[in-house]
Image: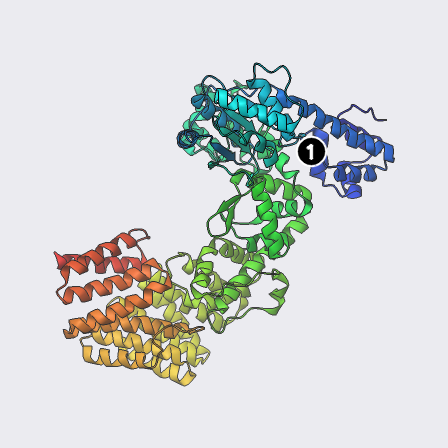
Amino acid sequence: MMAEHTQVSALVRAARQEAELTLEDLSERSGVSVRGLSDIERGVSRTPRRSTLEAIGQGLGLSDDQTRALVLSVRQALAADASLAAAPRPHRLLDFTGRDTELEVLGAMMVEPAAVIVLTGAGGFGKTSLALEAMARRSPDGFAFLDLGGTGRVPLTPLETVQRVLKQLDDELAEPPGALDEAIARWQVVAESTGASVLLDNVASEDQARPLLAANSRGPIVLTSRRTVAGITASGRLHVDSLPTESSTQLLERIIPSQQRTADAVAELVQLCHGVPLALRIAGNRVASRPQSSVADYVERMRSEERRLALLVAGDRSVEAAFALSYDELDPGGAKVFRALAMIEGPTFDPGIAAAAAECSLSEAENHLEGLVDLGLLEVRQGGRYRLHDLLRVFATSRLRLESTPEQVRDAQDRLSYWLVRSLLEVVAADSTGVEIPEEWDVFAVEGWAPPADRLAQRRWVFGQAEHWWPALTRVAGEGDLHAPVLVSRAMRAHVGRHEWNRWHELNELARASAERLGTPTLVAEADCALVWTSMTERGDPVSAQRYALEALAIATAEDDTYLSARSGFLYAWARAYTGQLETVLDHLDAAIEGYAEAGALADRRQARTVRGMVYRLVGRPEESAAELLAVLSELPAEEQPHEEFGDSFSRTTALEELANTSVVLGDSEAAVGWAERFLGVMEPLGSDVLTARAGITLSRALLSAGRAADARALLEKVEATLSLYPGNGHVAIMMLDVVELRDRLG
């Protein structure tokens, strides 16, 4: 049935058809995915692993001899590929485009004596083309080029590497030495006499290149590899990433005739190719090779993510095949983690999220992620985070869909979403009281993961992971879990209004909609109270804030809920106070303070008293303001405490701020500066630029009152520079008005 020299693709296809099996049938019998089988039969995967072939043989019911014939066909393919290693080098691209910065960096690296330069990156990103261009500019008279067979072929041995370099550079040598020591010795002589430069492409392992590094008197040696080849001590390293938009556009315009393209269609094609040079060249050549077609026609088909990789094929060049070479080197655990990355939202992620997506422990995820980095399938980012390139994400998504059932994908997405929401609540609970985490969510825990222990790290997690937990929360809510948004909105009370994230109002709107669907009036009132806060701090909309407060007050009154009545009344007064509508504000605050006392909510009561102290200043009663604020401070520790209630944290910072402002009104400039400096000292450790800027405004006002105009002006300039980085709404807009007022006074 099988000829020994037939390609494995033909052998597998013939055997499957003879057994009258579909790809799905064979997949079920062998355990090899449908996509994996399809890749083998289509020749995308030319050299599958022995274990894969043995599983296919078992699924087909082949004899041992027939299975060995499959394995032998792969060995022959590998041997045939290895013979290509001595083939002529790829040509230098006549239309080489962009990479000016990279070429400048490489040029500087090559000036170093006996430089060793490593270029890394995923397949298809143009490492070889960039290296050829740089080497041609550095060594126009020639250099040695060698493909070391690092992907999909039998890699050259260290001896073969030296021998083939010598064949290109040593005109006096009829036959290279047959022993490695002798070959290295000869290479050292040749390198010193010629100053030879060498480009080692497609490096599989460090051992292949090390013998050439023994020569200290030579030109640069440049290595390209999908792997990190971290075992090489390089004088310079460069990670080759996507082409920027401008260069991508220039490349397509060079390839595609003008009559077949429009600027808008080219711009969209650039986005769909994500700056990957191989994808851009394939796309450009496909359009150019069909004169009656246009870029717009091609883009119309490329918009479908499921079809995109299938369209990025031209002749023997394929983006999917380029990525598959690295993917096929992964062990089952690494391949599972890679596929799971397709489900992760956001441009970067950490190992905890990857572990949740792949349903493995944190340590396993960390190991597999490093393996993906080593193969060029993943990039390392700052802070222990990783990035999956957009087009590699499309590839990962295609593998996930083809190697998992829709039910398995949906279950994995649920698991990841609930882990993110649960972890958010865990992190917030580490620094807050009263956070509810449903016990039934414990099944989504990741072994080895724990929330950060440091308070600042906890807050950084909340905001740094918002790009992940927010889509997760909206997903579980969309799937019908109405309690999750309510729990998160309630837990996040201490963080609402922090400017590191600008979707607090959406979160509270989601919580309110969920509470309404649950039919629980008190939960609706809680969400209304949260919406008062974000209407003011994020939206700068006091009218809506007062409306939400009155809605909450009506519900609380109807439900006879003392605490909610006090809270909604307090928030109504607070919103009116910030807009200068001071009539009846003190009456509402007095009622709220009394209600909080009745409900035993002492932290909330202090918060209301602090706002009352602020209002006393606004209505011209500064002595009463100072007395109220000092009384509140006397009940609080000087510094924020672990698990401190939000009301006390608010009271401490606001009391310090208002004591500074009240001291200015009272004409006590020295006290004003002292209180303002304490306020700044409390705000700075919170790690929020906007909150620090708010304290800076208060200190600037105090400095100005003390006659220190130069200091006030210098500080105000820093504040203005900080606020310019944020959207001019909510509290930022109010602070900018304060900045303008102080600038006018400074002249």
Instruction: Give the side of residue 51 with respect to residue 370, left or right.
Output: right
Q: Is residue 382 visible?
A: yes
Give the answer, above or below, for where 226 lies relative to 421. Answer: above
Q: Quadrant of the C terminus?
A: bottom left
Which residue sits at x=27%, y=75%?
A: 585
Give the answer, above or below, for where 177 lies relative to 119. Answer: above
- Foreground of the two, 99 or 559: 99
Which residue sits at x=55%, y=21%?
A: 90
- Foreground of the two, 481 or 24: 24
State how the image is colored: rainbow
- The image shows residue 436 at horizontal and vertical percentages of 53, 70
- The image shows residue 665 at horizontal and vertical percentages of 16, 72
Give the SS element for disc 1. helix
In the rendered image, the residue lying farthest to the bottom is 598
- The image shows residue 702 at horizontal and vertical percentages of 19, 67
Q: Which residue is disc 1 drawn over? A: 39
- Foreground of the two, 179 or 741: 179
Which residue sits at x=69%, y=38%?
A: 35
Amino acid type at circle 1 is Asp
Instruction: Give the side of residue 397 with respect to residue 260, left or right.
Output: right
- The image shows residue 306 at horizontal and vertical percentages of 60, 38
Q: Quadrant of residue 663?
A: bottom left
Q: Quadrant of residue 657?
A: bottom left
Which residue sits at x=30%, y=58%?
A: 732
How would you rate the neighbour count of disc 1 (Cα within 10 Å): few for under 14, some for 14-19, many for 20 or more?
A: some
Q: Quadrant of residue 76?
A: top right
Q: Quadrant of the N terminus?
A: top right
Q: Is residue 508 visible?
A: no
Instruction: Give the side of residue 664 with respect to residue 96, left or right.
Output: left
- Foreground of the two, 92 or 400: 92
Give the answer, above or below, for where 93 lies relative to 449. Answer: above
Q: Number of numbered discs present?
A: 1
